[in-house]
């Protein structure tokens, strides 16, 4: 399998998987996609557990690459936590992606990426993983690479725009991990990362590599839980389930779309968004107008210029097809709060503000839409990570999962940074 940049429509420069994983983005600034979306293998459906689904389902993406023989070990190493599909009500399920070390779905991609990179990277070359985060990515990447031989990690996050618990997760590491609080928003952080990758000397010197959701090594494992959820809800002759995905940079949604294109039984895919309305506006009007992000309660989705849009456009034949195949629903902060409160009253469980946008989108479906098929709302983070928002809406505190409780005891260290490339380069060089 060869990979091509989204900005190389003539397909002049094919790249092997390992190289895509190490370089992150393509040299022309595009994002890598496989030359074709491979169909599910013959006899698909016998596997039920995550690791065998990953090993068989992802095999075509690894075909011909030196990493191919390592795929079972990578899957085993990375996908070592539970991803339960919980039934909340009749025809309403929640795919709980938050049982990893940092309690957000980013753990899936970050752990898989780290497992791949470690097996690719030459022992004599030190590498620096550079990551911009709107909250959850940085913690997951830090956890996945912490103390990993041959790797340093640099995290950029927007100062004051992450939850207190997220900030601890970004700053509690030390050793091979450095964290910078950037005076700006997530888009500024992403811009600094892009500028660093455009600087050849810096790339060479630090062995820069990306761990953002643009890295294909993060996208691939996210396909796996959609394959699994689709299998576990498949009834003979039944209507394929719809998926509702809390979305920011559109990486998780892209993985779902790829699973559907592979042939998984997946019905409608709905992007649940917060008040950042670049994506909802595109689906409503056809206009793609990236803009600055605004701060919302679902901060990991505060993205005004989602980079994976380029992948979605490439996966379909054009805007018309893309707009027919997906849709978007938007939740305001007030609707997020109301959904957290109402969901707790109805089902006795606390959900994070991101997951709440998905539950809101489900509530907004018509009664006939709700009845015609099972729906899966993707739960992207543990509610306790956003206790400052969630707890005032509930009768009592949200219990911390053990992994998070452990992080709270650690010392933190963070460096402050203006949103300027020169300042950033001199800080890390
Ligand atoms: C990153 C994140 C999202 C958005 O995912 P994308 O792949 O960027 O669309 C949603 N919820 C949580 C909790 C996240 O951390």
Image: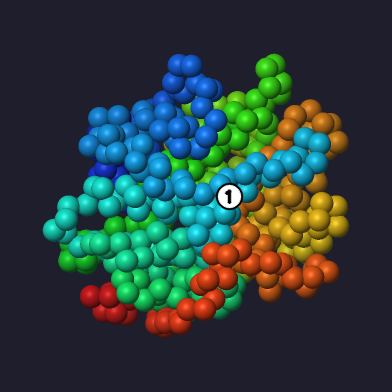
Q: Quadrant of residue 337?
A: bottom right
- View extreme (left): residue: 124
Which residue is drawn at the image coordinates 46% and 60% (left, top)?
Answer: 140
- Asked if 422 appears above or below 121 in the picture, the reply is below
Q: Is residue 280 visible?
A: no
* Residue 104 rendering spot, x and y as whole percentages: 55, 57
- Asked if 48 appears above or below 78 in the picture, the reply is above
* Residue 380 rendering spot, x and y as whole percentages: 60, 53
Q: Quadrant of the N terminus?
A: top left
State left or right for residue 225 relative to residue 358: left
Which residue is drawn at the image coordinates 25% and 62% (left, top)?
Answer: 149
State left or right for residue 344 relative to residue 6: right
* Residue 236 rendering spot, x and y as whole percentages: 68, 17
Number of labels in the image equals: 1
Q: Nearer the viewer, residue 192 or 290?
A: 192
Q: Quadrant of residue 388?
A: bottom right
Q: Nearer the viewer, residue 277 or 136?
A: 136
* Residue 10 rendering spot, x and y as whole percentages: 31, 32
- Asked if 379 appears above or below 267 in the picture, the reply is below
Which residue is drawn at the image coordinates 34% and 41% (left, top)?
Answer: 73
State left or right for residue 254 relative to residue 217: right
Q: Is residue 177 visible?
A: yes
Query: For numbered disc 1, what is the local secondary structure?
Result: loop
Q: Which residue is mark 1?
A: 97
Which class describes the residues within 10 Å of circle 1: few (<14), some (14-19), or many (20+)?
Answer: many
Q: Quadrant of residue 227?
A: top right
Which residue is drawn at the image coordinates 71% and 58% (left, top)?
Answer: 351
């Amino acid at each position: 399998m060869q990979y091509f940049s989204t900005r190389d429509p003539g397909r002049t420069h094919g790249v092997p998987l390992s190289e895509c994983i190490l370089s992150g983005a393509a040299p022309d600034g595009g994002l890598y996609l496989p030359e074709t979306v491979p169909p599910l293998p013959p006899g698909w459906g016998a596997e039920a557990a995550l690791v065998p689904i990953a090993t068989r389902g992802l095999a075509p993406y690894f075909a011909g690459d030196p990493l191919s023989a390592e795929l079972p070990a990578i899957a085993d190493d990375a996908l070592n936590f539970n991803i339960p599909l919980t039934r909340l009500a009749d025809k309403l399920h929640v795919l709980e992606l938050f049982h990893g070390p940092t309690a957000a779905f980013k753990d899936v991609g970050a752990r898989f990426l780290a497992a791949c990179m470690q097996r690719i990277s030459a022992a004599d070359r030190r590498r620096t993983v550079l990551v911009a985060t709107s909250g959850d990515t940085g913690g997951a990447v830090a956890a996945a690479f912490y103390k990993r031989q041959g790797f340093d990690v640099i995290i950029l996050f927007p100062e004051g725009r992450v939850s207190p618990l997220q900030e601890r997760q970004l700053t509690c590491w030390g050793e091979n991990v450095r964290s910078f609080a950037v005076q700006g928003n997530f888009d500024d952080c992403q811009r600094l990362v892009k500028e660093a990758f455009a600087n050849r000397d810096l790339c060479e010197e630090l062995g820069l590599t990306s761990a953002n959701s643009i890295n294909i090594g993060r996208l691939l494992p996210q396909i796996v839980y959609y394959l699994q959820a689709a299998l576990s809800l498949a009834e003979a002759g039944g209507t394929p389930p719809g998926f509702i995905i809390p979305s920011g940079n559109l990486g998780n949604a892209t993985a779902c779309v790829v699973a559907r294109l592979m042939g998984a039984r997946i019905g409608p895919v709905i992007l649940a968004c917060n008040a950042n309305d670049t994506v909802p506006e595109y689906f409503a009007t056809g206009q793609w107008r990236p803009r600055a992000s605004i701060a919302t309660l679902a901060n990991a989705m505060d993205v005004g210029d989602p980079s994976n849009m380029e992948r979605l456009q490439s996966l379909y034949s054009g805007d018309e097809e893309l707009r027919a195949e997906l849709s978007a629903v938007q939740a305001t902060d007030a609707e997020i709060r109301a959904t957290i409160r109402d969901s707790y009253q109805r089902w006795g469980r606390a959900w994070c503000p991101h997951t709440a946008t998905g539950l809101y989108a489900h509530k907004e479906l018509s009664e006939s839409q709700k009845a015609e098929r099972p729906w899966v709302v993707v739960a992207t983070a543990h509610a306790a990570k956003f206790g400052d928002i969630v707890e005032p809406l509930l009768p009592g505190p949200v219990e911390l999962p053990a992994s998070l409780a452990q992080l709270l005891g650690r010392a933190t260290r963070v460096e402050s940074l203006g949103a300027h490339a020169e300042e950033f380069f001199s800080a890390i060089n």
